[in-house]
Structure formats: structure tokens, C-alpha cells
Image: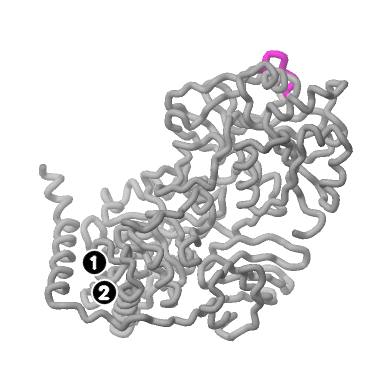
Amino acid sequence: MAKGTSIALLLRGNTPSTNDRNLTEILDLFEIPWTALTADEARGDNVAALTAGHQQFSILTSAPCLAEILRHCKTEALPTWMAAAASIFVYGFEATDPCQALLRQITGDPEAEVRGSNPQPMTVSVTDAFPEMCGPMSGLRIEVERGAADAALVIRNSQLQSIVGAPDGHLFAGFTNSGVHFFADSSLTMVDIRERTATYFDVKKRFAGAVPIVMYLKWAFRDVCLTAAETSACLIIDDPPLWPRYGLLDFDDLLQLADKLTFATTIAFIPWNWRRTDRDTVAAFRESSGKLSVCVHGCDHTGGEFAARSPELLDRKLKTARTRMQALHRNTALDYENVMVFPQGAFSPEAASALKRNGFTAAVNTEVAPANDALNETTLADLWSVAIVRYGSFPIFTRRYIHHGIENFAFDGLLGKPCFIAGHHDLLRGRGSELTAFLRLLASLQWKLCWRPLEDAVRRSYGLRPDGDTILVKMLAERLVFENGGPTTRRICVMKREPQVASLRGVEVNQGLIAYEYIDGYVRVMVDVPPGGSADIRCIYREQLLGSPAAESIRYRFGVAIRRYLSELRDNYGHLLRSRA
């Protein structure tokens, strides 16, 4: 970490609490440097030494801890060392006399109170007047579920800025005391991001202890947090063959909509369908200027084919899928994106490793945990990261359905994740009226949304931050593109976590091999990017293929064909039968 950056000063009791530990995990996830100071140490002369070498510091503390520290002050004024903080974040306002007295002291409102939140579902409102902190969540009204908020602060101060409001009061608010910016978060607990999960993160269910702290940290430590160069976006539609129509999807209508709303769509194409294409539809893809593309969607699209645990079977499936996609390219001149979307979202840890050694750039998926009997190691920290890299150190980017809600897409954007929308042919129901409304909602958010074909989008989804004269770039996909739009050459230090470096054959920059270092589990390369230039960086692995294209039995092939034809019958005619019922 470069000198002169911000540091977090964590005030806590002599014995760290569960909330203290949860908070440090969040700080570590965002790579924010921190140091701890106990209430007893705060009465001494330790702060200057703890923050030495850093340009500024911000304080994070629970309300009971801050109340204890201020109780020993001889005046109502803040201690000198505390007044030197760039900002102070206080959470955990319990319904006790000390916490209520603290709230009145720091807000200047003698009638301020801590109020237990209504346990019923409620609407919370994010201000649109503080986009620097709230980012893409600015101005949203969110219907949170029962228990998603656990307390509210009732404050009557004309100088107070309500950041997140609720019917009972403020969930998150900012104000100034003694020249110091305070931010009061009503959350009683911090989310434990080490918690394992088999489902996506939902701010409607877990707002308190998550959204306010992320907003604050991304704002207060913006000079040290990794940020996204852009929010890449792509609409991913699963299954359709390249025919003029499939179910409710009409490719002419989709292209017209894409021209009108300026978005990009990647079709998750089943390799089994490689012979079954329409010449004019394929031509429309080639001529769409990036608005339409195809990626790899399994192999035969059988149930759980990539939830298999056998490396040999997985390699055979992947080699068969690639052979078919290459045949599609030879026959139609339509290229494909080197990204996997797992059929039915089912995958195994071994599938991630197989994709890596078979040269895939990334996977994009709706499911966040391995299927069947595989051990689930996915944590909330993985879901708050740009991509899950826990399995085989291979990136699995997550995507969401529209029904997950605009607030979850916005929170992902706040975290620096790309905006990947999942769907099937029925997204175009009513000529895409629901999709149109949702895309307009996305366009209204406070972010830089860049629509791209899927592989291009994942190559541009990484974290970066200035580090002296260098830009640190945290690489996630197996391929990365960095563009220099500035007037001078920019030096980037690209780092990629790689616990299995023996499998790495080399690193390419603009198709030429470049020397790399391996330090503390990370592959590192230094690249100078000229003004107006770009660097296409790719990790190349020793394939070590364990199988050849599958020579499946006639019975298996017949079963696959029946499955595909029945699926197409359902998609093409099922909606008509339902509409007549």
C-alpha cells in the first residue's frame, strides 16, 4: 500500500466482538488498510503512531464503544485526535440510555432517539442528493422484507442529510459535529461475509449491516478501494437455436429493440445445435455490430452435464463442445465467445478446473454454489466480489434475472460487479415490454453502463486503483483488456491470483509472450500502454486434456435429440397453449 493513502481506525473493546470481526472481514475484502484501537488505548497517546504514514484516517466504531470513550472526556467537545478524523462511521445504536445519550450528543438534537424498527416489510428510500456515496442506488425506493432493517434513528436536525430513510426514521444519515463528518448507521449488526451461501445476495432480505457500510467504505476509502473502469453489461438469453423465431423471441424484433435502447445480447448457444442454423439469422448476427453474439451453453444441454465430478468426462464434454462451435464457425463464419454458461446453472468444482485447462476465458452463471453432492464453499464475500474464483481459481461471474429487482443490480454495481441479465425466450413476451421497462430503469441509474458482447464484457470486468506512478489492475477473467484513453503512456501492474502456477504456460500481451513474476500466490506483469493504445492480456495454461471428443452411444444420442426436440416444442408452442387455457 502506497504511503499517503487513507487508513481505517477501528475503535473496539478490549476483546473484539463478533461485529468487530465481521467489520474487519469487510475491510479486508475491499483491501482497505486498518488498525485497531481499544477504548483503553484511546485514552493514551497512541493514535498518532497508529496512523503515521497515512494522509488521513477515518474512524469506524460501534455506538456503545464510542459512548464509553466519550464518557471519560471532561468536555462535550470531541477529543483532539478524534476531531482530526476525515469522517466517523458509527453503527449499532442499541435501545439503551448510553446509546441514546450518544446520539443526542453527536447530532445536537436533545430529543433524538433510537427506535426499534417495525418488523413488517417496509419501503426504504435512498437519497438522490449524494451520488458520490450512493452510486447506482441513488434515488431508489426499495421494498425490503421483514427483518431486513433492525432499528431506526429519529433525529430532528436541519443540517442532517438523510442517506437512507424509512417510515420510522433514518437507517443511515450524515451530519457534522465539531467540524467532523459523522455517518450514523442504525444497523445493529454487521453482515458476516464469511457465511456460506447457496443463493444470491438479496438486499431486500439483508439490507441492514450490508448496504450502508458498503456505501460508506466505497466513498470514504475511494483512494484505496479497487474500482471498476466501467460497469460492463450484457443480456444473456439461454437456449435459442439461430432461427428467425424461437418461442416468443423474434431476432428481428430483438435487433430493433437493441437499436432503440442500445444494448447487447449474447445467446447462450447449445453446441448440439451447430448444424441447425438459419443462414439469414446467422448473417444478422455477423452484421449486428456487436449487438448479437453467441457463447457456449454446455455441450448437449443434458441435466447436470457440468455437475459431473469426473475430470475425464468433463474434458470430453468440453472438447466436444469446442469441436462443434468450431464447426459452426467454419460453416457460417460466425465467431463465438469463449465463455461458458452452465445448463440449468449446475456445475461442480471440477468443471471450473476443466474450463481453465481447456482455455475458456470465464463462466457466467445464475447458480452460485456447486450442485449435487459437491461441498459448497461459496461465501457472501465471493458474492460481493467481482467474480467467484474459489473453485479451481477460475472466474465464475454471476448474473441475475429481472425478477431479482433493480435494487440488487444497483448494489452489484456499487460493489463493482458487471451487469449481466439472464433470461430465456419469454423475456420477449409482449414484444419485450417488460424487458424494455427494465432496461430503461437500468439506464436511469447513476453509473457508467457499457453494453458489450459477453466475452468482451468479462475481459473488462476487473478492479483497479492508482499506486504511485503505476495503476494496479486485479485480473479475474483469464483474459483482460486495458485501454489507455489518456494523453501519456500509462504503466499498469497486472496481478492475478494463481495458486496453481505450475499449470501456467505463459502470459501473452497483444499476442506476444511477456515475462512475469510469481509473488505471494499472484502472477504479476508490468505493461506500458501507450496513449490511445490497449493491452490484451491473456493467461495461457497447459491444457493436459484428459479425453477426446465424446463418442457417445446411439441410445445416448437418441435421448439427447428427444430432449432437445421436446424442449423446443415446449418453448415454441407451450405459451400458445397456456394463453388459450
Which of the 4 quarters of the picture holds residue 219? top right
Residue shown at 64%/61% (left/top)?
Answer: 464
**Mark 2 sits on what residue?**
280
Residue shown at 60%/70% (left/top)?
Answer: 482
Locate the C terminus by quadrant. top left
Q: Nearer the viewer, residue 124 or 487?
A: 124
Q: Is residue 129 visible?
A: no
**Magenta residue span:** 107-112
Task: Name the disc covering residue 56, or none.
Answer: none
Q: Are marks 2 and 1 in contact (CB under 8 Å)?
A: yes
**Mark 1 sits on what residue?**
244
How busy is the neighbourhood of tag 2: few (under 14 within 10 Å), some, or many (20 plus)? few
Tell me if residue 276 comes above or below residue 230 in the rendering: below
- Where disc 1 sits, the SS reads loop
Tell me if residue 316 comes above or below residue 497 in the rendering: below
**Residue 108 lies within the magenta run:** yes
* Disc 2 residue type (three-letter): Asp
Locate the N terminus by quadrant. bottom right
Q: Is residue 143 left or right of residue 511?
A: left
**Residue 218 lies within the magenta run:** no
Q: Is residue 224 left or right of residue 203?
A: right
Q: Position of residue 432 (x, y in %)?
A: 31, 51
In 3D space, how far apart are the residues under numbered discs 2 and 1 (Cα atoms)?
8 Å
Q: Position of residue 127 (x, y in %)?
A: 59, 34
How busy is the neighbourhood of tag 1: few (under 14 within 10 Å), some, or many (20 plus)? some
Q: Nearer the viewer, residue 239 or 261?
A: 239
* Disc 1 residue type (three-letter): Pro
